[in-house]
Amino acid sequence: MSRINNNINSLVAQRIVGQQNQQLSQSLQRLSTGLRINRGADDPAGLIASEVLRGEKAAISAAIGNAERADQFVNVAEGGLQEVNALLVEVQSLVGQSANDAGLSTEEKEANQLQIDNILQTIDRIASTTSFQGSKLLNGSFDFQITGQGANVTDLQVNNAKLGDANVAIQTLVTQSAQHGSLFLSVGAAALDLTAATSSFSFELAGAEGAKQFSFGSGATLASIATQINSFTEVTGVSAVASGNYIELKSTGFGSDEFVSFNVTNAGGQTGGVKLASAGNEADLNSAAGTAFTAITTAIRDEGQNIAGTINGVQGLGKGTSLSINSETLSVDVTLNATGAQALGASTAGTITGGGAKFNLGAEVNLNNQVQLGIQDVSSRSLGKETLEGTAYNLADLGGGGALNVIDGDLTKAQEVVSSAIKGVSIQRGRLGAFQKNVVGSTVNSLNVALENISAAESTIRDTDFAKETAELTRSQVLQAAATNVLSIANSQPQNALRLLG
């Protein structure tokens, strides 16, 4: 049937041409942008999923940047510590040279002291000038702030902690006391009573520092024996206290590395024999509980005991009087004095109120992804802190006029202080290195893998499949051409009506 007013075939062809034009435009857009989803209408659900993944990619990329920045931060700090360590080794050498008293002139000692003074000034300068984007790294600015340190706490060092917005109290619970290595020597009287005046009472005494042979004649008092033992305490690491009819032999330090070993090599016919008790009750020394020696016997040895306990509910590692933990949320070292280390029970070591270098190493900004790293002050007054014979010292005491100067100071103590300073700096460098390798390095590797996987997932949803889309483009082009031809034919159909009128 032929009509003029309404060309239905033309309308159908127009609609199909429009659809083909739309499909062709969509294919061209996808191929030109490289994206399968360019607007919500292309794939609403896919758009939502891909935008979420894009957000995750952005967060992960930022976290990778944060971790890399943290690595650079630590590199700067470690560089300063490396130079401080080299300077401390030089100080150790100068102290050792200065101990050769007879072989050095006064001028040489003064020259050594001048070098040490310059080194201490350089260490202080490094501590005050090492910085990262204007922030001082080695002057204690990034150390944790501690308040309310316990009376029995001699040292409290926080290496890292997750604080959030709240203060963190450090609670210690001592479950096993720290002990010296200890032996009690008894001869049944306040003085030796040997069978002959020419006889000698000989023994070998050993401790953590070394061993020494002693020999005494008849009539030697226990007090004089203790005095002689104490004159070699630096050699043996053992001190002695005479009381009544016995001598207490005690290691100078606490812990399982400390010990006292006593071996009678010649009893000299001591009247009543010789008795030893290992860290026992002093009242038992003259009873059957004492251990009788023959003239030659094997050594009796008593080792010290490390402290044991918990910090904030986490089982700690004890060494001597120090207790430490290294958990995900808190890494801290607590050193107690003799009173605190030998008293069982709970106490507060201190409260962390802030501080530390904070890094956010994860994609999400929350406490789980945050790390707070403590970097201690490395100035001369803060390094090498040691209490020796009841007096507190630090590296600054090696300066001119200090108690540990190399001209007329105590070089034995000076060497101990320098050794302690080297150990402290080395430990701090080790902690920073472990942070770089095991925290920052592992985090970057993990984040890179996550970024790859999420990028792949986002690409699968959103990116154009060019093989598929070029085929779709060819199909659309062919269909568009066909539809256009059909439209031309449909538009010519009304001409047939004119023929009927002719």
Image (tube, helix red, strand yellow):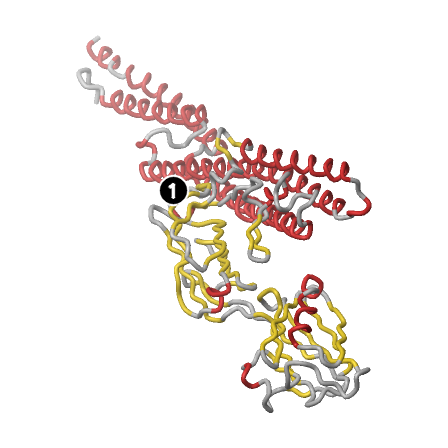
Left or right side of 157 for 122: right
Task: Please provide percent x and percent y for residue 330.
Answer: 45, 54
Q: Which residue is mark 1?
A: 365
Farthest top residue in view: 502
Callout 1 amino acid:
Val
Pinpoint residue 460: horizontal percent, then vertical percent.
Answer: 45, 39
Please identify the quadrant where the N terminus is shown: top left
* Viewer-nearest residue: 458 or 419: 419
In the figure, residue 105 lies in which quadrant? top right
Residue 213 vertical position relative to residue 480 in the rendered view, above or below: below
Could you tell me which residue is drawn at 64 percent across and 40 percent down? 82
In front of the other: 465 or 73: 73
- Picture quarter containing residue 174? bottom left
SS class, disc 1: loop
> Is residue 368 shown above or below 129?
below
Q: Is residue 64 left or right of residue 410?
A: left
**Residue 301 x, y percent position in the rendering:** 66, 76
User: Picture quarter containing residue 283?
Assistant: bottom right
